[in-house]
Image (tube, grey):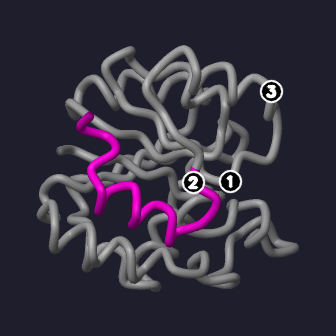
Amino acid sequence: MRIAFDLGGVIGPRYTERQLPDGTFGMLPGPNVGSIEVLRWCAQRFSPSNLFIISRVSRDNGQTKIDGNWAWLRHWGITDIIPEPNIVVFAGEKEDKKGYAEKLAIDVMVDDSYECLASMPNNVYLVAFLPQTKIPEVWALLKSRKGIIALDWGAIREIFRHSYIEG
């Protein structure tokens, strides 16, 4: 099983929450509660080679945001869990994640964005991580396709532990 995680809003804070007055990005806040532990658990269960990060930043000042996300990932040791070749950080539109998911042959996408989840290929199992907006649309999407909502990282571990995805 090849699993992709979003960075901002899932593994850690959105980059806007880490932006400093000079436009660069800091290392705080750190990873979301439980994310590091569950990523390590997933790496043991599925192998680091089957874990991915697909993270999108907006195009404005995109390279600074990309560099800031890479620095954050390295600072918090996430690249020690998920190999750097399995991490994609790009500037573009939310829907552009679909192309990366197809290229990487992703089976499961964990994301907090309705637009990202809705753009995924039909064969990708969707895990909506604590969605903040478009809740009715998220529910409708998950009802029409294979998917589930995870309210925290403990729920993500349980989803993968009990193989809800493979059924």
- Residue beneath label 1, please? 130
**Residue 21 relative to residue 154: left or right:** right
**Mark 2 burial class by Cα count in 10 Å: few <14, some 14-19, many 20+:** many
Picture coordinates of residue 160, whole percent (x, y): 32, 57
The three-letter code of the residue at mark 1 reads Leu
**Residue 105 relative to residue 148: left or right:** left
The three-letter code of the residue at mark 2 reads Ala
Between 93 and 104, the one lying in front of the other is: 104
Picture coordinates of residue 162, whole percent (x, y): 30, 57
Residue in the picture at 37% in, 84% down: 77
Residue in the picture at 82% in, 39% down: 133
The three-letter code of the residue at mark 3 reads Pro
The reply to whether discs 1 and 2 touch (Cβ–Cβ < 8 Å) is: yes
Between 106 and 84, the one lying in front of the other is: 106
Sequence-earlier tag: 2 or 3: 3
- Stretch of the chain drawn in magenta: 150-167
**Residue 116 relative to residue 37: left or right:** right
- Residue beneath label 3, please? 136
